[in-house]
Amino acid sequence: MRKNFGMKTWIYPMPVLILGTYDENGVPDAMNAAWGGAYDAGKIIISLSADHKTTKNIKLKKAFTVSFATIDYVAACDYLGIVSANDEPDKLEVAGFTTSKAEFVDAPIINELPMSLECKLEKITEDGNVIAEIVNCVADEDVLDERGLPDIDLIRPIIFDPAAAAYREIGEKVGDAFVEGKSIE
Amino acid sequence: MRKNFGMKTWIYPMPVLILGTYDENGVPDAMNAAWGGAYDAGKIIISLSADHKTTKNIKLKKAFTVSFATIDYVAACDYLGIVSANDEPDKLEVAGFTTSKAEFVDAPIINELPMSLECKLEKITEDGNVIAEIVNCVADEDVLDERGLPDIDLIRPIIFDPAAAAYREIGEKVGDAFVEGKSIE
């Protein structure tokens, strides 16, 4: 038997994306977003309400970073999603994060999160969604494997479980992708 | 020190979405997609090349389902992503899957995957991305918790690790979301 739940935004898994931006005075801000994903090769889409400070900053700077929330900063990353910089201008500091300017875009990298995407705004859709080019993926050398590629067990990203409103870690490897050597999309 | 990788479509985590469709003869098809996510409340966006049979079927039927790949069907779900129904018309059968018609849309539910979204095509973007309303979320009663909500430990969805081209399971709970009672987006 199956049970119907009607209209739900339940996707398994959902990411915990930390969006970093600068405002008109160069003050860094960050928020937490679960609604987004790959839009095309080298592109990302994020669903954002227009009233977020992040949205205003993205429109201003045409740039943002996406860092992946990690096990070591679960509560701090959750805080970024529940408090607005419109109400708490020092929210990054309150959360315990520090930032550095990204190398390729005018947006802050969060030093404590080991892997980030540097994104240039391509357009905002008619529905208000942000579509951006990923101009650079940057990772701490501490989270690279012996081949020099990002190692998910060292990054330790978290997952959002929408029905339970909980965060989960990544578990064991259960298989290889593209076993016949072709690419999925 | 940080290492730059340039333009990469690396998001942590990425989902393993199984898209179910019918063709003009009512023959079910399914494919595997990692590029997509929530577009807005009750909406999903998927990046799909125009040459997929799935894309043609979605345009024809204005409907599809999204099921979440699970630990028990890793190899079968991977197969759906590497073999096209254009080349193997019986790919669902070869993969070992059976289907039933979804209750609210003209698309197949994969019986072996316990949780699905029934989606109605809203539009295809100028870039070819599919945006759809999630008209129903449907889950096997076997994967519900004591409150009657989907339990991620019973669904057992898998995650796609893009840099390693591997599938991972969901790990332990590491925290609650919205600790201050507000919603993230």
Image (cartoon, coloured by chain):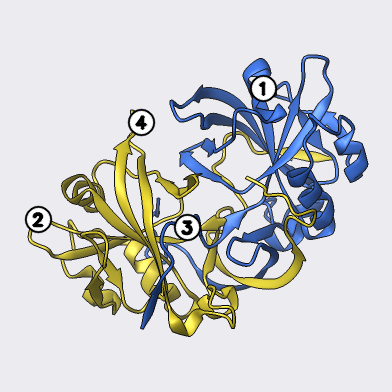
Chain colours: A blue, B yellow
Specify whether A29 is left or right of B70.
Answer: right
The subunit letter for the residue under badge 4 reads: B
Picture quadrant of residue A117: top right
Which residue was labeled with disc 1? A56
Secondary structure under the numbered disc 2 in the rendered image: loop
Distance from Cα at disc 3 to Cα at disc 4 = 26 Å
Secondary structure under the numbered disc 3 in the rendered image: loop
Residue at figure coordinates x 74%, y 26% from the top left: A107
Task: Evaluate whether residue A182 shows in this view.
Answer: no
Which residue was labeled with disc 2? B24
Secondary structure under the numbered disc 4 in the rendered image: loop
* Identity, as a three-letter code, of the amino acid under mark 3: Lys
Which residue was labeled with disc 3? A8
* Identity, as a three-letter code, of the amino acid under mark 1: Lys
The subunit letter for the residue under badge 1 reads: A
The subunit letter for the residue under badge 3 reads: A
Specify whether B109 is left or right of A110.
Answer: left
Residue at figure coordinates x 80%, y 32% from the top left: A85
Which residue was labeled with disc 4? B127
Q: Earlier in the sequence, mark 3 or mark 1?
A: 3
Instruction: Give residue A27's position: percent from left, percent from top.
Output: 84, 23
Picture quadrant of residue B21: bottom left
Residues at circles 4 and 2 in contact by the CB criterion of under 8 Å: no
* Identity, as a three-letter code, of the amino acid under mark 4: Asp
Distance from Cα at disc 3 to Cα at disc 1 = 28 Å
Distance from Cα at disc 4 to Cα at disc 1 = 24 Å
Q: Select label 4 or label 1 by which is in front.
A: 1
- The label on residue A181 is none
